[in-house]
Amino acid sequence: MRAFTHARVIDGRGGFIPDGTVVVDGSTIVNVGAASGVEILEGTEIIDCGGRTLMPGLMDAHTHLETTASNNVINEVAQYNLPTRTMRSYWNALETIHAGITTVRDVADIGDCVIAVRNVINQKLLPGPRIIASGKAINQTGGHASMSTEYQWSRPDAGGSGHCVDGEAECRRAIRTEVAAGADLIKIYVTSGLYDPFLGKPRDEFSQKEIEALCEEAANSGKKVAAHCHTAKSAKYCIENGVASIEHGMMINEETLELMKAHGTFWVPTTIVYQLMADGAKYGLGSSTIENSRKALVNQEKMFRKALEMGIKIGIGTDCGGVLINHGETARELECLNRWGMTAMDCIRAATSANAELLGIDSITGSVETGKEADIIIVDGDPLEDIRILQNQEKILVVMRGGEYYKDTFSGLR
């Protein structure tokens, strides 16, 4: 049994204890409270945090562990076969947890490589973060992330770009195939993206009937749906059919927000990747991508500030492994949303307990509470004063997942 004492405890639900004690027994948090009110049993290992911040491990609800940041993800994917990409997925998972991100939701695993990595971690054959994996995403012929001469996502021997489907029957078969492969959730591409130079500006792709079929089939299997979606029209179809989250949402409007509020739908804006794309000239991105991103960011910021006023559920995701954003850089999204009006405390809540709700694991983790798994980090500083401190990995002194240390760079704590 371990007792972390003299800690500034941020519980992940908006609560704060200036001088707190957190007691961990094995993999579980068994007591949390003010130092004066927590009994420490004889024989407990005492770890004096010296006034540092103890908080839940961060979560990233939009990652691509199979790939690494690049100004040309297409070429980056195409050069590796499946075994190599599986090993790279695991390496990226380790990079992630060492940065204080103890849980990720992987959305669009081109070759089902991340499902394999998740399995070996769950079986405790290898250490790593908790992974909620979608497996292959579902897209339409010629649409975003599909195989085509202009948009060659992967080598023929690497498992394909995902399930490229047309019509309701094919949509249902693709869902069933990924469920059989072990997917924890379903990822669908219902619009094109901003990084689609041959498609022009974002467009609607799957039809209303196809979206209905996708969502119904996922629901039949008990799986949540994450929808890559930029436009208000496609967002409406998705929300009305019960998707768990709208990913990106660069061109949504106030009607979209009203629907989100009514249905309890999460918005995962992943704004950091578009901030980088808008400044893409120095990264070698094309002019259409830069122009699309700059225009869309104006609308996204306006809608985000409105979403905060309305109390829309916000999740934290980065699209890391996609264009320009590296694994382990989840805290950069917190800085972006903080600039757009979200308080530091709410940024942390979004990246912990709110993300846990979105991922369906809030009964297990996401907050520093009695009965939850000990997924915690200790930070040398105060993220409530400056959220950017969470980007400094030297300030992340301790990372613990399920009571096991993944990082401990401050010898005075042990």
Image: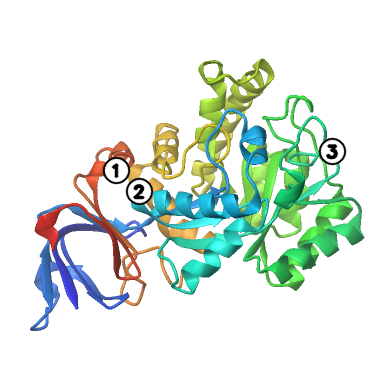
User: Could you tell me how far apart the alpha carbons at marks 1 and 2 are, in whole angstroms?
Assistant: 6 Å
Kind of residue at badge 2 = Ala
Kind of residue at badge 3 = Gly
Q: Residue at x 29, y 39 (%)?
A: 392
Q: Residue at x 62, y 45 (%)?
A: 247
Relative image position of residue 134 (x, y in whole percent) = 64, 59
Say how the picture is coloured: rainbow
Give the class, few, some or many, for how many residues have Cα within 10 Å of label 3's Cα (few <14, many ≥20): some
Which is more toward the observer, 133 or 35?
133
Answer with left or right where residue 186 lies relative to residue 305: right
Relative image position of residue 30 (x, y in whole percent) = 26, 78
Answer with left or right where residue 119 lies relative to residue 251: left
In the picture, the disc for residue 99 is 2
Cβ–Cβ under 8 Å for marks 1 and 2: yes
Can residue 275 be seen here? The reply is: yes
> Which residue, given by chain and number where applicable, does mark 1 sit on?
393
Q: Quadrant of residue 201?
A: top right
Which is more toward the observer, 331 or 312?
331
> Which residue, given by chain and number where applicable, does mark 3 sit on?
142
Give the class, few, some or many, for how many residues have Cα within 10 Å of label 1's Cα (few <14, many ≥20): some
Q: Of helix, strand and loop, which one carries label 1?
A: helix
Relative image position of residue 299 (x, y in whole percent) = 61, 28
Look at the picture and state if 42 lies above or below 91.
below
Point out the image quarter for the C terminus.
bottom left
User: Could you tell me how far apart the alpha carbons at marks 3 and 2 are, in whole angstroms?
Assistant: 37 Å
User: Could you tell me how far apart the alpha carbons at marks 3 and 1 are, in whole angstroms?
Assistant: 40 Å
Q: Of helix, strand and loop, which one carries label 2?
A: loop
Kind of residue at badge 1 = Gln
Q: Residue at x 79, y 29 (%)?
A: 150
